[in-house]
Amino acid sequence: MRGYAGKFAEVDLSCGEVKETVFGEETLKQYLGGRGLAAKLLWDRLGEIWERVDPLGPENILTIFAGPLTGYYPGSKMCISGKSPLTLGIVGSTVAGEHAVDMRCAGFDGLIIKGRAEKPVYLLVTDDGVEIRDASHVWGKGRVETYRILLREALQLLEGRSPGSREWREPSILHIGPAAEKMSRVTAVQTKWAHGAGYGGYGAVMGSKNLKAVLFKGLGPLPEAWDMGRAREIIWRILRICFRSDSMRRWGTGAAGYDVGSRLSSEPVRNWQDEWHDERSFGVDRFEERVWVKRYWGDFGCPSTCLKLSVVRAGPYKGAVCDNPDYENQAYLGTNLGVFTPEENVYLCSLMEELGFCGIQVGNTLGFAAELYQRGILTKEDLGFELRWGDVKGFERLMKMMAEREGIGDILAEGTYRAALKLGKLKGLDLTRYAVTEKGMGIGAHGIRSKLDYVEAVSYPCSVQGGDHTSPAMRDIRKGDSELTVILHDSGVYCWFNIMKDEALDLIWELIQAVTGWQITADTWYKEMALRILAIQRAALLVGGPDITWKPIKDDDLPARWYEPLPSGPYKGRASDKKELEEDRRRYFEDVGWDERGIPKSSTLKCLGLEAVDKKLRSFLGNQ
């Protein structure tokens, strides 16, 4: 078998046992790796009891998987999954960096982590295997200190084992912040000083397992390719396509910050009460002039170098550091909170990363809280202070309360949807109307009311990853940014920012064959493999539990906010159309082999070899 290290490390934190697990070639060929293989493993092991599995309990399984193209396709990523504390389904959450390459060079395609350690621990993954090590000394520490301490410690340890080798360069590190240790559902699995796998809330899953970090350092080669000469030729063709992305390389996704708000009217403004602004102070040129100190910076093996390093050099937020900010963080920790200056946005991003939150999720929740304050539903007595749009100090204070689960921060740390339910009960009001979420997940920062952005009416309601803007359902299921295509990237596992051109997507099938030797065609993928992974994720979402269950159709809807007309801008008055959504949803369900309620048909599941999923779904939904 080519393209794989051939083994996965399985770690039981409850008993401290580490063993190796092997998947058969047929399983890997059907699910590839990353998101696909995680869905298969999670359902096989937990599907029968899915509705009873507490995502923050020791029974949940955290997977950290690479894929066969990780390290080969330009721009490597890691895919983290498990039962999501936000959606209660299976979310494939990816993060860029060299950790996946380090893991594969150490001889592993992934980690399967279960149980709960008695005291804080971290994992050290090297060519010698996986070690469980004490992390009590970094528990409670933020991003910067955690990273510095563990990096120094690992280097000393590895150099001590192999003195003078000079081979031990910086190990790659996944870690969590204080908010994740407190099991806030809106937290990320972070890497380095910035970056994070945010969707899904898997920082909280690591926290629930007392797992502070995972360090990787492999010195071996990547798994051998089936035809390395052919693979090298295809990689160079892909690189030449990526090099033509001048806009991405110069500006990164931050270029969209002003444009999406001003031109497309689809950026969240003050908790999505509006989606239009014309604040030129928030243009990418202002970020470039005022805060970028490193203009071209890429993750390991990435030719696009879309990252930037931002530092606030003067004023009350002097010293704040973060990467970019990218479009999503500009939006959710900027315009969505009424913040329109680069320095204040960089500060909030830096604080978010220091505490271990996901920028999208925590920004969604902060905006929700601010709107409740604006409407007089939350008061100064509830919060302990006033909270107004653009008040950076107020949002700073509330974010810290969420990280410590202090006061009302304890409720908000559950995420927007669950906070809406709990606060609504306390206030005797329906607050879900102000929660811009999908299946418990804060929605990506791309609206649909103006109909000018890339997402469609069905994109969020029908996505098996909830409000994930990077995995949108599309009526054309073979489209380059459709959920079925993204499943390919997330299972591969590589960065799909380097595959935005159709000509690059066309080369994927050839590269899979060059690396693995398998002939997987576009037809095989869209008619069989992707549908199989999609059906498992949909089944897990429908079963849900234990605290919330999503109802087909009723919960496959847009947030109430998006049926309100846009209040300003060139597209003032536009709103989502219920009938249009219903028709698009019906067509999408039909195209992926689900019935009119969005339940995968028995005939579809049996054709895909998912009889166990079919049996569970009929049994569970029949009892509802």
Image (cartoon, rainbow, N blue to C red):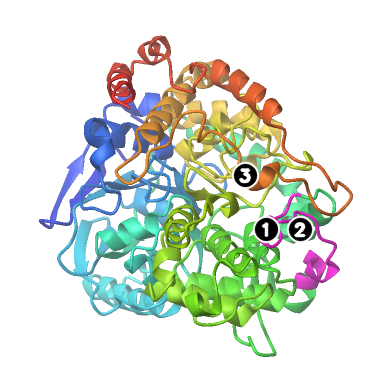
The stretch in magenta equals 266-287
Mark 2 and mark 1: span between their CA atoms?
7 Å
Which of 156 and 81 lies nearest the eye of the viewer? 81
Q: Secondary structure at mark 1?
A: helix
Q: Quadrant of residue 213?
A: bottom left
- Residue wearing tag 2: 255
Q: Position of residue 590 (x, y in %)?
A: 56, 16
In this view, the residue in front, 184 or 24, is 184
Which residue shows up at 23% across the image and 30% down it? 48
- The x, y position of residue 612, in whole percent, is 27, 20
Q: Which tag, 3 or 1, sits closer to the chain's start?
A: 1
Residue 327 got which mark?
1
Spatial CA distance of label 2 from label 3 is 29 Å
Q: Tell me which amino acid carries mark 3.
A: Ala
Q: Position of residue 254 (x, y in %)?
A: 71, 60
**In front here: 356 or 467?**
467
For marks 2 and 3, give the one nearer the viewer.
Answer: 3
Q: Are marks 2 and 1 in contact (CB under 8 Å)?
A: yes
Residue position for label 3: 560
